[in-house]
């Protein structure tokens, strides 16, 4: 540790720190633009100039290393005059358009100009103008004249996103930030550039001119998309969601969110929202009141159970639903005498009697891995923020990332070995790695393999070396027809290398769905069986089987054979084969809980009132259970439901009990699984109903590539 004096106070900081870090520890604010705690040091803006004793001139706090006994002052005349001079230069070419700038009210330049700017400019020459640029459907670069060349966006793309999509060209007053070749910004986490831009040069295209920042109410929430469980700040005006930005949580999403977390809110205000219950009669849809709709469903379920047995009734539930909704759906189905409920809609193999599959380690630990083997995942697109953490482990710690996949995707990071093989050969590839581990550790191989390639040897060596390593099974591995065999091989490798093994897990509540038992026991029908046409009554909760299941378009024909199909959805979905549509609230209009990949339980509240006659899904299930006279479904609030699930008082959240989390399997170790169909996984902007209905996301390069049949 190094001790310095900062404004008369002693501060201890780690050796190698900069003066800016010392100021952070001491709680002393130093004005800055280009410095950001998650980015490399650029020292572009010079706004952080401070007075260091014995230094002839003011020095930048962000780029000045501390030395023992250093005396730093931030409020002397020398420091303040230097900062005022920098501000005068920054404002020379900056346009005076604060009244129409989307950044107005939360602009760092605006704030610091009040403290360090002059009342009038001495610059009388003509101001420069930078032409607008077209950067795609998410980020607006209409007013690049505002840019102060802090290069935060450039460094973010290169260091955090892994793709340098922006750069600076020319010199002096002709310098400008541009995409160089006129390309669009296509990174899956590109929206964070909007947040870190200290002025209004980069703004949100969907939010553009929608509201002023001081008109917005800010409310916390949790992302309903992938399994990271990103913490969000949802910004609302007149009971309408207008913007979503990150809420900082170092253990989960740091200060970033993925673009689908940021821009999927467009779907909440789309024309496809279902606002009243609909009933199909004579092939025509009619709006009805809730009492009529629920009585119709209740009577239909009673009649079908009496005529065909309770085993003819089943529920397909989305793992993007809340913990309370999943629990009540199971209670409802079980109360009817059925065990047919499943959230594993895209799976091809259905294990029974196993523990809750999870990440196998903490999310934060991904940033410090020394080696990783990723199986069956387009990590960058499936889990953008997990990929970002592993990218930091590669960039800062030299982590060796290896993969087994059907396609050699663009990982946007330096890769070790990528073993490309069709899905039917993934078990063989893992068996080869296991054999290489066995050879290097001088133990018996779990299964015999004919050849031992150099790639497998290199993967094995990287997993044996180091202390922190993980084997991560992706969405395609979870949906694989021999998923349990892949897990068994991964488990053997992990046990013999000291690595952790776990699933990246597909959706916001995949872990929670397993915990509350939203899947059948031994006698129940799984998702594939229910979508094969075996049901007389199907409850589709927050899911569209044509897009969300392995059955795909065939599910429509299968469900069309049922006597009654009830869809619970925020949108006008499944209309071709449904008999009843019940409008349930999306995550912004209901309270609930998600459990992320590491088992972290995160609750949230509604941020706006329900649209039209939309009702919270948990409440619809509760009332339907009451109509069907199912005992034990009398909860008054979602917190009461959560307490019933966790066994803890309302408000006491944390993690799923460790005893429930278990990635072990009894499956046999095999080297060859024979010919198998390719696993079904959704592309980045087809994952759920919200992203599918976001106009901006559907215009991105990733969405267009998926629709054209390319890899997302």
Image (cartoon, rainbow, N blue to C red):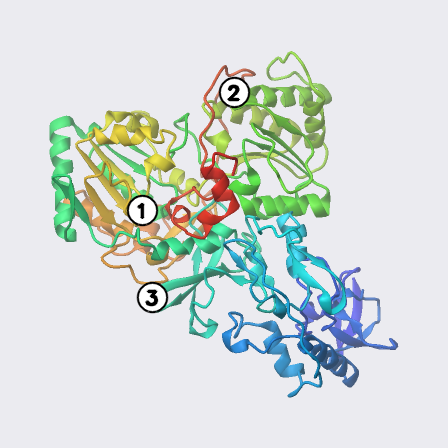
Residue 555 visible in the picture: yes
Nearest the viewer among 343 and 327 is: 343
Q: Is residue 149 left or right of residue 704?
A: right
Rendering coords of residue 422 (x, y %)? 55, 23
Q: Label 1: how many residues lie within 10 Å, few (<14), some (14-19) or many (20+)? A: many
What residue would you read off at disc 2? 424
Q: Which is nearer the N-term, disc 3 or disc 2?
A: 3
Q: Disc number at residue 325?
A: 1
User: Nearer the viewer's eye, disc 1 or disc 3?
Assistant: 3
**Of helix, strand and loop, which one carries label 2?**
helix
Image quadrant holding the N terminus, namely: bottom right
| Residue under the point 72% across and 73% down | 47
Cα distance between the residues tagged 1 and 3? 24 Å
Q: Is residue 241 above or below residue 533?
A: below
Q: Is residue 524 left or right of residue 167?
A: left
Q: Is residue 50 left or right of residue 571?
A: right
**Of helix, strand and loop, which one carries label 1?**
helix
Q: Label 2: how many residues lie within 10 Å, few (<14), some (14-19) or many (20+)? A: many
Q: Quadrant of residue 688?
A: top left
User: Nearer the viewer's eye, disc 2 or disc 1?
Assistant: 2
| Residue under the point 57% across and 45% down | 386
What residue would you read off at disc 3? 239
Residue 38 visible in the picture: no
């Amino acid at each position: 540790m190094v001790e310095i004096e900062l404004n008369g106070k002693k501060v201890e900081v780690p050796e190698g720190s900069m003066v800016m870090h010392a100021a952070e520890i001491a709680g002393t604010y130093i004005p800055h633009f280009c410095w950001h705690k998650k980015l490399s040091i650029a020292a572009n803006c010079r706004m952080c100039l401070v007075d260091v004793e014995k230094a002839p001139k003011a020095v930048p706090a962000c780029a000045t290393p501390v030395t023992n006994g250093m005396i730093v002052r931030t409020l002397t005349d020398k420091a303040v005059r230097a900062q005022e001079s920098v501000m005068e230069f920054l404002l020379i070419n900056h346009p005076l358009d604060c009244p129409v700038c989307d950044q107005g009210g939360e602009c760092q330049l605006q704030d610091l100009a009040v403290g360090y700017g002059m009342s009038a400019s001495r610059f009388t020459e003509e101001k420069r103008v930078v032409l607008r640029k077209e950067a795609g459907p998410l980020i607006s670069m209409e007013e690049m004249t505002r840019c102060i060349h802090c290069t935060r966006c450039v460094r973010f793309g290169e260091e955090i996103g892994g793709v340098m999509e922006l750069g600076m060209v020319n010199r002096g007053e002709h310098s400008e930030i541009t995409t160089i070749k006129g390309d669009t910004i296509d990174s899956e986490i590109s929206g964070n550039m909007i947040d870190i831009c200290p002025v209004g040069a980069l703004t949100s295209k969907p939010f553009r001119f929608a509201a002023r920042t001081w008109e917005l109410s800010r409310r916390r929430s949790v992302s309903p998309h992938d399994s990271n469980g990103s913490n969000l700040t949802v910004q609302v005006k007149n009971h309408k969601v207008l913007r979503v930005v990150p809420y900082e949580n170092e253990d989960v999403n740091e200060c970033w969110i993925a673009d689908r977390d940021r821009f999927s809110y467009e779907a909440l205000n789309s024309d496809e929202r279902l606002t009243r219950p609909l009933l199909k009669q004579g092939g025509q849809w009619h709006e009805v009141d809730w009492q009529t709709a629920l009585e119709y469903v209740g009577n239909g379920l009673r009649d079908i159970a009496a005529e065909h047995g309770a085993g003819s009734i089943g529920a397909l539930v989305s793992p993007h639903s809340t913990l309370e909704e999943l629990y009540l759906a199971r209670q409802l189905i079980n109360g009817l005498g059925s065990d047919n409920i499943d959230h594993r809609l895209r799976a091809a193999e259905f294990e029974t009697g196993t523990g809750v599959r999870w990440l196998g380690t903490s999310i934060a630990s991904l940033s410090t891995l020394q080696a990783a083997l990723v199986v069956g995942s387009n990590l960058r697109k499936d889990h953008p923020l997990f990929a970002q953490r592993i990218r930091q482990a590669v960039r800062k710690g030299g982590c060796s990332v290896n993969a087994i996949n059907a396609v050699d995707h663009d990982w946007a990071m330096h890769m070790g070995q990528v073993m490309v093989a069709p899905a039917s050969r993934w078990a063989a590839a893992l068996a080869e790695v296991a054999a290489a581990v066995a050879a290097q550790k001088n133990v018996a191989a779990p299964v015999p393999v004919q050849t031992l390639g150099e790639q497998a040897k290199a993967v094995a060596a990287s997993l044996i070396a180091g202390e922190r390593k993980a084997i991560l099974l992706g969405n395609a591995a979870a949906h694989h027809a021999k998923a349990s065999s892949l897990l068994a091989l991964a488990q053997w490798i992990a046990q013999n290398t000291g690595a952790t093994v776990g699933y990246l897990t597909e959706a916001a509540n995949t872990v929670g769905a397993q915990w509350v038992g939203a899947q059948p026991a031994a006698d129940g029908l799984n998702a594939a069986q229910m979508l094969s046409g075996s049901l007389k009554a199907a409850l589709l909760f927050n899911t569209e089987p044509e897009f969300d299941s392995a059955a795909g378009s065939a599910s429509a024909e299968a469900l069309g054979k049922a006597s009654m199909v009830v869809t619970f959805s925020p949108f006008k979905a499944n209309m071709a084969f449904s008999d009843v549509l019940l409008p349930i609230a999306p995550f912004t209009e209901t309270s609930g809980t998600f459990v992320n990949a590491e088992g972290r339980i995160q609750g949230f509240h509604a941020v706006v009132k329900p649209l039209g006659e939309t009702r919270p899904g948990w409440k619809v299930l509760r009332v339907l259970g009451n109509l069907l006279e199912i005992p034990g479904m009398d909860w008054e609030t979602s917190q009461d439901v959560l307490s019933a699930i966790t066994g803890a008082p309302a408000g006491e959240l944390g993690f799923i009990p460790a005893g429930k989390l278990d990635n072990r399997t009894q499956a046999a170790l095999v080297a060859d699984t024979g010919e198998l169909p390719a696993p079904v996984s959704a592309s980045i902007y087809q994952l759920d109903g919200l992203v599918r209905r976001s106009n901006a996301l559907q215009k991105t390069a990733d969405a267009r590539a998926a629709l054209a049949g390319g890899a997302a």
